[in-house]
Image (spheres, rainbow, N blue to C red):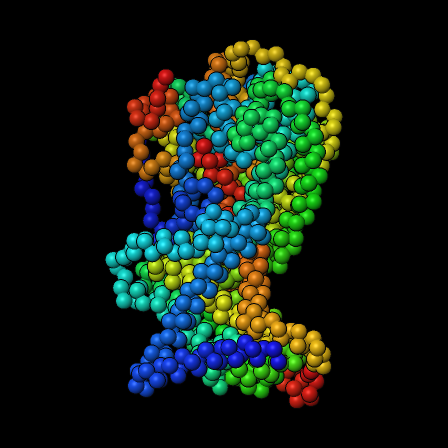
Amino acid sequence: MKEVIHTPVPSVEEEEYHINMGPQHPSTHGVLRLVVSLQGEIVKSLKPHCGYIHRGMEKMCEKDTYPQIIHLTDRMDYLSAHINNHAVCLLVENALQIEVPERVKYVRTIMDELCRIQSHQLWWSSFGMDLGGLTCFFYGLRDREKILDIWEETTGARFLQSYYTPGGLMWDIHPDFQKKTKEFLKYFRKKIRDYEKILSGNVIFRERSRNIGVLSKEDAISFGVTGPSGRGSGFSCDIRKHNPYALYDKVEFKEILYHEGDTLARYMVRMDEMYESMHIIDQLIDNIPQGDYSAKMKAVIKLPAGEYYQRVETARGELGLYCISDGNKTPYRLKFRTPSFSNLSVLDHITRGLKIADLVAIGGSLDLVIPDIDR
Amino acid sequence: MDLEKLKERVLTLAPEAELEENKQFLTFIIPTGKLHYIALKLKEDEDTAFDYLFCQSGTDMGKYLMVVYHLKSTTHDHSLVLKVKTEDRQNPSFDSVCDIWRTAEFHEREIFDMLGIWFNNHTDLRRLFLDDNWVGFPLRKDYQDEVNIVEI
Amino acid sequence: MASNIYDNFVTSLTQWIHNGLYHMLPPFWALVAELTIIGLVFLLFYAVVGLFLVYAERKVCAFMQNRVGPNRVGPYGIFQTIADFIKLLMKELVKIKNSDQLLFNLAPFIVIIASFMAIAAIPFSKGLHAIDFDIGILYVIAVSSLGVVGVLLAGWSSNNKYSLIGAMRSGAQIISYELSVGMSLLTIIILAGTMQFSEIVQGQEYGWFIFKGHIPAFIAFIIFLIASTAETNRGPFDLAEAESELTAGFHTEYSGIKFAFFFLAEYMNMFIVASIGATVFLGGWMPFHVWGWTGFNQVMDYIPPLFWYFGKTGFIIWLMMWFKWTFPRLRIDQLLTLEWKYLLPINLFNILLMAFVVLMGWHF
């Protein structure tokens, strides 16, 4: 067996020194350790050390049944919990060729888009806070509470709901769901203008983000950077458009693309995506059909032997589930291709030659959720 | 490029490649020696242009260890799956493709960490999630761990 | 004028203490006693205003962020700062092994001394100031520059990379912005014709300088606000202590009472620059008078000068808090660019403009 190489110590040139950011640090969103090699204020290179929240999910999945795996996926990218659950449900439903009722598709699409909005709200809050505009934190989270209240009423939990099951939903939506969601949309349409005034229109913010951390389209494709970070570089990778699932082929929405590839572009993609998500919910919220909230499923779910790849568009990018099944009730191998994993790999490449303050801005604009990287 | 032409192209590049039937994507098992050559050609040729490696995973299939590459072309919108296998469980190794698709840098480190598969010519192959002095490769089916794995 | 009532009260009180002391003690000891009393009064004032400002900042920031702020300790949370202060007093003073002990311990004191010395020259009401130099403004600018020595010493002696980066940034920032502060005050000196604080305030009897000097004074005021926020490491210029980047910058390694000193000194610096701004641009303790409206002026005089002084200073402090909590932070190179490429040329042009205006008599 080849020897394990010990972590190479970065070579220390004249005037270069190393700073350790993390694992506990106000601005690495989660437990990520970055060893930054600096010359004065300029970043020469950067090495991320992951694994602080590695829980061995892929190994756990080999012993868990498919409904149990849904609870694990919640905890990967906890801000896109619904969308992660959706991936597992779709994997099972497509493998078993089960048709879910229309009502389920409507509710799932609406919940997914609410999930995307609240993830972007939290991202906006922490991005503003990282750059020093501490008030952004409170404004974004105050509005996010409204979505969490809607979820609490229907699913019973504000966070990590595990509301979807293979075949449908765990239980039916609350009678007030449609009313509350419409109220939220009306409220948030006004508030998002405030967000634009505080950050997007602010000259200090623009100077801190324009031309910072430019990622070219070829690099984005090569590094596999998907989601809003990739779309900020012009890489058209929205799974909702390329491989539609649920009702995404029936609703009308735009795929937001910006071509500059800098921090400001990635920021604007997410801001515009919030508008698009609200537009999608608008088209669906009044038309939820009556019907069952779940298709009939067997008690024990066994996928036929074979390989399946299911992809969904989370708030961070493409989540891919690659499942090798041997016909049992647990998968033989389940690989999670998580968006933040690939998004992190590009951090070193685009931060070289910039300052520490820019590193914080770029890390925020890539919107990394560390449990997504480590699983 | 449609499926038939793609099939032909891969078989031209590697006549010993085996086609796997009835899979979600067009899947080939290719000889390990030609991995880097085929990958480079598939990326650089204009009519295949597989520039996006969207998933690279390693599996312990019991008898052999396997690495699966899911490729997609952003220009032509076709997908392909390549698999390489090795029965050598003591010193499994493949060629690294991180010079072709840079996303492989992290993916191959993870596969090395979890399965012990060595990738030749990788820029910086070391463990990613586990400690540097960890013994063993957790995703292998014969991995025993009294401390961290609780069998119910 | 009605303000005579208040002046007389202050003057008679100080005269009474002065006479009493000289009566009781030999002249040298009476002088010492008088100076000690003045020093103690100022220390008390310093501490009380500092405590109050910390509370005010927390409340103002809370209201801007859609929350309530401290409201448990005492009615409306007014004893919160005292509780915090007692807690800080009781904390362990962490000693660092491989650091220069003398410099490490000295740094917080230098920062406090610098801000304390500056307070001495500011007039709070007619006749109510410790020293009335005829080079008042020059003295204040000179003495508040001493604070940067404390910051640099703190960063260096902490033996910590984060602190050093923070201190270097802060040092560069303060030294650059002192220029802008000095030059914007220079603009008003040209208008006032004197550097003595009491004369400056007296000169605003029939209109504050910001109105008298119209355009150039207004520009100078804006520049003064920006530059003084940068001087005190506050607001959008607080990258020396940028929490999200460097944990706590130059005062990372300080705990307990020494940290309290840095914290207090920051708020008192804010108070000092706000009061200089209020004195020089907005008239200090001088009520709002309009030339010719004697009835109106008399009404204005009924409001005590102390009230005017604290009101104006409070207004400027509130402005500074407002933009701290709204804007994101500037990066170090953007900060220095702002000073050297934008504020400095505008300042120079403004001085010329003001000189021209004064020569031609185009002011009120």
Residue C213 position, x and y percent, is: 65, 79
Question: Between residues C183 and C44, which one lies in front from this camera angle?
Answer: C44
Residue C2 position, x and y percent, is: 61, 77
Quarter of the figure with residue A40? bottom left
Q: Residue at image x 43%, y 50%?
A: A46
Question: Between residues C245 and C115, which one lies in front from this camera angle?
Answer: C115
Question: Between residues A245 and B73, which one lies in front from this camera angle?
Answer: A245
Q: Quarter of the image for the N terminus of chain A: give it.
A: top left
Count the numbered circles shown: 0
Q: Residue at image x 57%, y 42%?
A: A141
**Left-right relation of C270 to C97:** right
Q: Residue at image x 47%, y 68%?
A: C269
Give the vertical position of A178 relative to A193 (above or below).
above
Question: Between residues A264 and C212, which one lies in front from this camera angle?
Answer: C212
Residue C169 position, x and y percent, is: 44, 64
Q: Residue at image x 51%, y 77%?
A: C9
**Left-right relation of C140 to A315:** left
Given the current orientation, which residue lies at the most extreme left position? Answer: C97
Quarter of the figure with residue B63? top left
Give the vertical position of C11 relative to A244 (above or below).
below
